[in-house]
Image (tube, coloured by chain):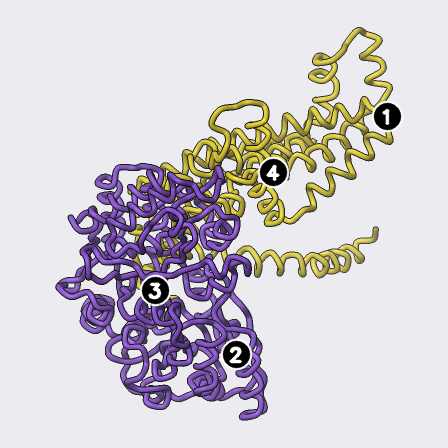
Chain colours: A yellow, B purple
Amino acid sequence: MTSLSMPAERRLGLLLVLPAVAIVLVALLYPLGRQVLMSFQTFGLAQQFGQAPAFAGLENYAAVLEDGAFWAALVRSLVFCALCAALTVVIGTAGALLLTAVPRWIAMGVQAVMLVAWAMPVLSSLQVFQWLFDARRGVVNWLLTAVGIDGAAGFNWLSTPVSFFAVAGLLVIWMSVPLVVFMVYAAVTQVDESVIEAARLDGAHGVRLFTTIIMPSISSVFLLICLLEIIWDLRVFTQIHVLQGSSGITESTHVLGTYIYQIGLSGGNYGVAAAAATIMLLLMLLVTGRYIQLLLRGAKD
Amino acid sequence: MTSFTRRHALGAGGALGLAAALAACGSDTGGGDGGTPELTDEGKDLTVWFMKDSVSEKAMDWLKSAYEEKTGGTLTYEIQVWEGIVSKLQTSLASTSSTPDIIELGNTQAPTFCAVGALLNLDDLKEDLGGDSLTQSLVELGSFDGSLYAAPFYAGSRVFFYRKDWFEELGLEVPTTIEQLTSVATTLHEANPGGNADFSGLWLPGIGAQQCYAWLFTNGGRIATEADGKWAADLSSEASQAAFAQVQEIWSKASRAGSVTDPTTGGELHVPFNAEEAGMIFGFNWQYKSIDEKLQDKVGFFGFPGVEEGGTGHPFAGGSNVAISASSQKQTAAVEALRLIFAQEFQELFATEGGWVPGNIDHASALGDDDLATLTAQAVENSVGTPAAANWALVEGARTLDDFFVALAGGGDPVSLATTADASVTDMLNKS
């Protein structure tokens, strides 16, 4: 490269990156800026319909932090996220390893089926799950009754918080396991066969083979999956929101996402909702910070 | 409140309550700026939001062609579902680019949108739309600061459907007091003439807050009352608690539907009725159309009974208002469409096709004079609405009352449930 072409190439580079930057600015930074601004304003329905918002200082944040419902939703979110993310990653990874051990056509078939599960719109899956778990006509209660479990007939799964989250969690896991399987399977099949072969000859099998050979080789993909799962399961909204509509126990099933929706869109208090959303964002960064750090370090290596 | 006619109950809450309660929000919220603003006029093709099950196909077709004939513009209907509509309206109505031009608002939601300045002032139009013949309770819910923003669209109220053949078989009489209602339902329930494991004497779903309001209102209880510009929830009062004891008795002795928490299942009353899983249901007159043809002859009707013999039952006042968005850019055309909605043809189609009591009660006679029509008209006449508070939509959005009745149906303690619900309802209604 000559010294003359450098600036030209850089200019071209900048030009090419511009659309991406513009999209990020418009689609992410503007709403985020608006949200942070709103979180310091008294912003309710009247403001939504044209009245000028007043500066509220930290009042909105104080309102969120003083609200017991926020802390309850926070705890629910964290526990729900931890359980769902952990189960998804474990089941997904185990599934992927199983796929490497079966004949190729079975692996292909299983992946095709999983792709359908994964590509199914959330609302459709929700409808199917609601039918499966329907108190009176659902196949789950029918099966449980058939195997002789007392009290399963007519049991309303959505009417107690624990069974509510069990159904919601099952749906969330069911919908995200396929992606974990795809990614881990793809990563594992990239691991050099000869390395595994060598390890086998040295007597490494099962767990030991996985922890010492496979895991280190796929660690960056694995980290990325963990990060994505945590983010997805922490900000879960649709599944909970829709199931809440059929539960009759809205208050005791709020997670952070539905809590924010509740105060903002249902409650018409956009200022406080923005403050809660900002707190949730900070929380996400806190929870995922370590992973992002590891990922970035991995990328440098 | 000493008298519980609909007009009275809503009148106190509406005319006095709204103005007083909202004085705190300031009359400069855009709602009460007095004179009629200039109408926008940027086109004739309108977007119209009607709610599911509100306007019949026939009425929509009539309106569309009448509008086209009159103005040359077209109407595009977008049918909305009740679930989540408040949030959807909050965001859509605020934007000039995405707002529908004409909107149907549930009567319980109307006060909120009238108060925030989301709707066009209809004062100049009121006489043309029907003036004093407009259903008064809906006028009050659709007004703010003495101005009309959302005109009465239609009203409806629930009546009991029962199986005449089973009543006869068991020697039961149509109940004339709430106590008799409970005992009739219990007898039916125990006899199980449907021979069905899921049989309910009265199929009353746990998620059916609007159905349960009939017990509350008839006993003289209210969801919330307003005094000196402050709202106070009323679920802990003696009258309200008496009502909750009665519904709990139904759920424990005469209904297996208390565990139903899915609003769709809870709303489709004809399903258990057709499956012979219900001796009685409490639904809208138009739901008769969904009853199996071979059962239709066996169905009888009665209105919600009073507390005492000869007393009056007060079911929940269902219904809608219709309004023009303040941010619509085609208000001139929307006004023309609104006039057509209040034309005799459209109003009568509400009654003949939909089975609703039309917003202009001069046209209510189109409902007919059979048993069901007469009982429906009576029910509407005696019905009571939810509080005419600007913030009522927030309570609906939080599902506080829905969840309250679900918990009651599950056998929860009415006193402690009421204390909790009262606190959150009072808090939401008084939020500025």
Q: Position of residue B63 (x, y in %)?
A: 53, 83
Q: Nearer the viewer, mark 3 or mark 1?
A: 3
Tell me what residue is drawn at x 33 percent, y 42 percent: B186
| Residue that carries the numbered disc 4 in the rendered image | A228
Amino acid type indicated by mark 1? Pro
Amino acid type indicated by mark 4? Leu
Does A293 appear above or below B91? above
Label 3 with label 1: CB-CB less than 8 Å: no
Measured Cα–Cα span from mark 4 to mark 2:
50 Å
Q: Position of residue A77 (x, y in %)?
A: 46, 37
Tell me what residue is drawn at x 72 percent, y 30 percent: A184
Measured Cα–Cα span from mark 4 to mark 1:
30 Å
Around disc 1, counting alpha carbons within 10 Å, would you say few (fewer than 14), some (14 to 19), or many (20 or more)?
few
As helix, strand or loop, the secondary structure at mark 1 comes to loop
Measured Cα–Cα span from mark 2 to mark 3:
24 Å
Label 4 with label 2: CB-CB less than 8 Å: no
Q: Nearer the viewer, mark 2 or mark 3?
A: 2
| Residue that carries the numbered disc 2 in the rendered image | B59
Left or right relative to B179: residue A300: right
Amino acid type indicated by mark 2? Ala
Left or right relative to A185: residue A136: left
The answer to whether residue A164 is seen in the rendering is no
The chain that hosts pointer 2 is B
